[in-house]
Image: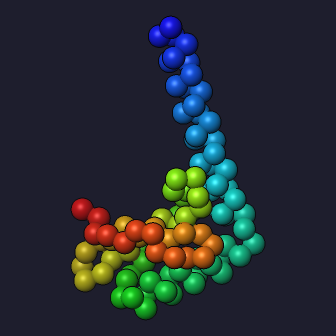
């Protein structure tokens, strides 16, 4: 019983990891990725941020951009939906 439960857990973890990688590859292969990335950076710069890093990621199975940025000397973690670039999360990263 324990062995089959452990095997099922490993399979589920591997499947979730594959799905995450698929979403990231989907974002990076989007022909509009660079244009959307530039748009996201400009939008955040207008809000006073200095963007350090933009990475494709997934959140709850949906494509997002995970962004590290600074504002007023503090580091922020920002998540934007992709490709519409709506702010999902915007908070100080401790």
> How far across and down, in percent of the image, does residue 40 sit?
53, 80
Is 1 above or below relative to 84?
Answer: above
Place of residue 31 in the rendered image (x, y in percent of width and height, measured from the top left): 75, 72
Image coordinates for residue 32, horizontal then vertical, percent: 71, 76
Q: Is residue 54 visible?
A: no
Task: Classify residue 41 as left or right of residue 90.
Answer: right
Relative height, residue 20 to residue 70 (above, below): above
Image position, residue 79 (x, y; %) = 45, 67
Q: Residue at left 46%, top 74%?
A: 87
Residue 77 figure quarter: bottom left
Considering every residue shown, the one lying at the far bottom of the view is 46
Picture quarter containing residue 73? Answer: bottom left
Q: Quadrant of the C terminus?
A: bottom left
Front residue of 94/12: it is 12
Residue shown at 44% from the left, 83% from the top: 44
Residue drawn at (54%, 33%) of the image: 13
Count of numbered labels shown in the rendering:
0
Q: Nearer the viewer, residue 25 or 53?
A: 25
Residue in view at x 40 percent, y 68 percent: 89
Is residue 44 shown left or right of residue 11? left
Q: Quadrant of residue 16?
A: top right
């Amino acid at each position: 019983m324990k062995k089959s439960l452990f095997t099922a857990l490993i399979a589920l973890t591997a499947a979730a990891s594959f799905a995450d990688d698929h979403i990231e590859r989907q974002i990076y292969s989007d022909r509009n990725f660079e244009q959307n990335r530039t748009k996201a950076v400009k939008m955040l710069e207008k809000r006073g941020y200095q963007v350090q890093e933009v990475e494709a990621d997934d959140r709850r199975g949906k494509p997002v951009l995970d962004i590290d940025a600074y504002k007023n000397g503090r580091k922020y973690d920002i998540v934007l939906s992709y490709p519409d670039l709506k702010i999902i999360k915007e908070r100080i990263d401790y």
